């Protein structure tokens, strides 16, 4: 995995890292020498297996369970993450992703998405900043969504919450400088979502200018760029094959219907 990043490897908190993209992030950066604080909510068995694999490969990992819809749990998560040392990288990867639209949107749906996708990252970012030592530099990476740059009304509440997270990324970059940098990555379709079949996923993955969607390896490469580019803040890297330049009327999960 190369060792050019090992000089800056410290403790990295990744939320929602038991499965899917978060698990790949954890495995990659553990191999790069980072001590991973792997957050999970209900996926205890998957988190334990992920930790076992990281440790079997010689990596360092600590597991912390927390419900990101609970302010007390979010506070406890950062306390646990920093119990054995300063955390120098925070990846807000966990996300609530439930379907609603303009005709079913509700107070409850907006509140649920905003709590997990905005309020938890906002509080974690503040607590992350506060635990940095006098000489520390911190880096936050917020996982956004390429659809923010080619908008459509599917996943109504989710989209609103990710739009708010984009704003948080920008104002946090302003508020916490120069000690902390805050950037985002906005992938398009990377893994099957919304109940897609494998065939539908492959088809939707190719429906863009470049004929290819984002890969987990590219997301990890973008993370490495952000971590190593000490002048980058308030920036968003969009990885969607150009979908945002030709925005579809529906979410990628519904391509097969249109």
Image (cartoon, rainbow, N blue to C red):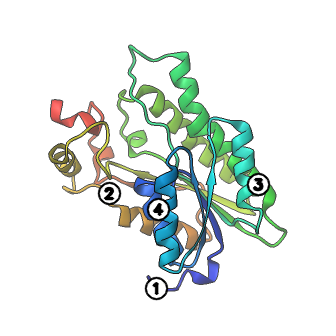
In front: mark 1 or mark 2? 1
Expressed as whole percent of the image width and height from the top left, the position of residue 250 reads 27, 31
Residues tagged 1 and 2 counted as in contact (Cβ below 8 A): no
Q: Name the residue beneath numbered marker 4.
A: 49
In front: mark 4 or mark 2? 4
Say what secondary structure mark 1 lies in: loop
In front: mark 3 or mark 2? 3
Say what secondary structure mark 4 lies in: helix
Q: Quadrant of residue 70?
A: top right
**How far apart are the two marked residues, 3 and 2, measured between alpha carbons?**
34 Å
Q: Name the residue beneath numbered marker 1.
A: 2
Side of 60 relative to 186 (left or right): right
Residue at the spot 56% in from the left edge and 41% down from the top edge: 165
Residues tagged 4 and 2 counted as in contact (Cβ below 8 A): no
In front: mark 3 or mark 4? 4
Side of 50 relative to 114 (left or right): left
Q: Name the residue beneath numbered marker 3.
A: 79
């Amino acid at each position: 995995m190369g060792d050019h990043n090992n000089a800056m490897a410290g403790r990295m908190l990744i939320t929602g890292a038991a499965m899917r993209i978060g698990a790949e992030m954890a495995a990659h950066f553990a191999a790069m020498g980072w001590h991973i604080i792997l957050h999970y909510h209900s996926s205890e068995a998957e988190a334990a297996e992920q930790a076992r694999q990281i440790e079997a490969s010689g990596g360092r990992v600590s597991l912390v369970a927390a419900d990101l819809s609970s302010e007390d749990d979010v506070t406890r998560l950062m306390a646990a993450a920093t119990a054995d040392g300063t955390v120098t990288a925070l990846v807000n990867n966990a996300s609530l992703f439930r379907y609603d639209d303009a005709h079913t949107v509700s107070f409850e749906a907006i509140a649920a998405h905003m709590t997990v996708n905005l309020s938890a990252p906002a509080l974690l970012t503040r607590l992350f900043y506060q635990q940095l030592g006098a000489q520390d530099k911190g880096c936050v990476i917020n996982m956004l969504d390429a659809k923010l740059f080619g908008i459509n009304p599917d996943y109504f509440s989710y989209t609103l919450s990710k739009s708010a997270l984009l704003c948080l990324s920008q104002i946090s970059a302003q508020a916490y400088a120069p000690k902390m940098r805050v950037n985002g990555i906005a992938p398009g379709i990377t893994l099957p979502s919304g109940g897609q079949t494998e065939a539908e996923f492959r088809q939707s993955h190719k429906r863009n200018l470049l004929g290819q969607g984002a890969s987990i390896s590219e997301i990890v490469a973008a993370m490495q760029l952000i971590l190593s580019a000490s002048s980058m803040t308030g920036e968003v890297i969009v990885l969607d094959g150009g979908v945002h330049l030709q925005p579809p009327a529906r979410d990628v999960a519904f391509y097969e219907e249109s």
